[in-house]
């Protein structure tokens, strides 16, 4: 026990508190250190929880050595997979009834592939796409591993590493670069009245390659609202996504079980519906505003008769010779031409610009006249002061 230490004498006549020795603040300093140490413990615990969560995520990276593993039944080729497990997983992921047929689901559960598509999916986000899992090969590059981990963390999916001897079992094709395959539940059908114009309507398009190319052209030309009939909706698979190079993720889709009814609903919203048909005499021309919809039909039969009866007008792509163009090329030309500003719109904008320039010129003339009036007044006052000083 320490003896009492006398305080330092204060100056005579001063009210200042006595000076305490520095060692008496050691207890206070220890309290501060104790508080800081407790804060560090809390931070360490929080950091430990974060590290634990990350370690749990890393535990989801499992190596697949058995081709019959039920976790990767979606990735096996059709000849080798268990059809019962396959159907059950698809219905579960699509949140559908057990009795519902796989061709009538409200969202597509499919396996997409390609590093470019996965990068586009990561850039677009997981708002409308649910990634179930990702499968890559053992020994994949660090860049691909990091990309797959980021997508899995964002979309709460699982990451699997595939043994090299299972390449043929899971169709990990090496011809398109470093192989990566991922199962997605996509897309969710949007509400028609909430989708912004213009629209692209695909009636009976059944080629996944053409579907991917058409949607890619539409998205790159500014259309993000796409209406699909049921046969076309079922073609939103991995091949269509690969043909679009991942641009399918940037569009909104509406599943039209009854396409004529959906077109009539568009017309009630003030949308002009065009049908692209090579037999009609009118050539495609610009539409004055973006409130239009383009209907593109089947590769062989074209637009169906019941859909043609619901259209406001028809158009075609002018050709010098040869048979009809590919549906993807024809759709891209029609979208480009319809989106161009019409002559009337350009003339109207030029007239408005000329009126604005004329109005601005008149305002400048008035401002100039006001300036000249003020200048005259200034000189008059100046002259009056001069002569006033003389007299």
Image: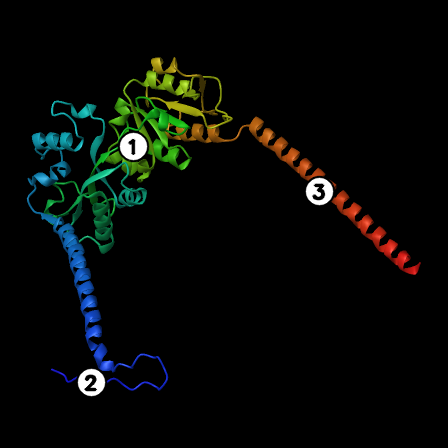
Q: Is residue 35 left or right of residue 355?
A: left
* Marks 2 and 1, the one that precedes in the sequence: 2
Up/down of 167 relative to 218, above or below: below
For the residues labelled 2 and 3, the Cα–Cα distance comes to 88 Å
- Identify residue for label 2: 5
Mark carried by residue 364:
3
Residue at the extreme right: 391
Measured as percent of width and height from the top left, residue 31 is found at 19, 70
Apparent side of residue 92 relative to residue 201 in the rendered image (left or right) = left
Q: Nearer the viewer, residue 73 or 7?
A: 7
What residue is shown with label 1?
209
Sequence-first disc among 3 and 1: 1
- Quadrant of the rendering where the C terminus is positioned: bottom right
Could you say where residue 340 lies in the image, as x and y percent from the top left?
50, 31
Which of 277/260 is in front?
Answer: 260
Q: Residues within 10 Å of mark 2 (few under 14, many from 20)?
A: few
Which of the two discs, 2 and 1, sits closer to the camera?
Answer: 2
């Amino acid at each position: 026990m320490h003896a009492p230490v006398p305080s330092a004498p204060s100056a005579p006549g001063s009210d200042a508190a006595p000076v305490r020795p520095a060692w008496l603040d050691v207890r206070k300093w220890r309290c501060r250190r104790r508080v800081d140490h407790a804060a560090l413990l809390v931070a360490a615990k929080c950091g430990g929880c974060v590290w634990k969560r990350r370690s749990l995520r890393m535990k989801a990276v499992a190596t697949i050595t058995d081709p019959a593993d039920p976790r990767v039944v979606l990735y096996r080729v059709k000849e080798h997979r268990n059809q019962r497990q396959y159907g059950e997983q698809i219905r579960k992921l699509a949140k559908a009834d057990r009795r519902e047929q796989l061709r009538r689901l409200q969202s597509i559960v499919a396996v997409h592939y390609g590093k470019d598509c996965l990068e586009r999916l990561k850039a677009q986000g997981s708002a409308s796409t649910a990634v179930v899992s990702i499968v890559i090969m053992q020994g994949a590059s660090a860049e691909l591993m990091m990309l797959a981990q980021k997508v899995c963390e964002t979309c709460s999916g699982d990451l699997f590493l595939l043994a090299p001897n299972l390449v043929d079992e899971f169709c990990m094709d090496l011809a398109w670069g470093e192989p990566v395959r991922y199962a997605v539940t996509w897309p969710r059908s949007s509400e028609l009245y909430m989708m912004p114009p213009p629209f692209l309507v695909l009636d009976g398009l059944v080629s996944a390659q053409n579907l991917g190319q058409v949607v890619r052209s539409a998205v790159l030309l500014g259309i993000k609202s796409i209406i699909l009939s049921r046969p076309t909706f079922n073609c939103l698979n991995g091949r269509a996504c690969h043909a679009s190079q991942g641009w399918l993720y940037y569009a909104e889709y509406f599943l039209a079980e009854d396409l004529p009814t959906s077109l009539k609903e568009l017309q009630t919203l003030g949308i002009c519906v065009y049908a692209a048909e090579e037999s009609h005499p009118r050539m495609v021309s610009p539409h004055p505003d973006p409130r239009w919809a383009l209907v593109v039909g089947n590769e062989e039969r074209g637009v169906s008769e019941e859909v043609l009866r619901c259209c406001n007008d028809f158009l075609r792509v002018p050709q010098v010779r040869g048979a009809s163009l590919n549906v993807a090329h024809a759709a891209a030309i029609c979208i480009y031409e319809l989106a161009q500003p019409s002559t009337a719109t350009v003339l109207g904008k030029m007239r408005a610009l000329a009126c604005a320039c004329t109005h601005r010129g008149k305002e400048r003339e008035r401002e100039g006249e006001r300036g000249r009036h003020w200048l005259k007044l200034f000189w008059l006052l100046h002259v009056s002061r001069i002569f006033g000083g003389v007299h």
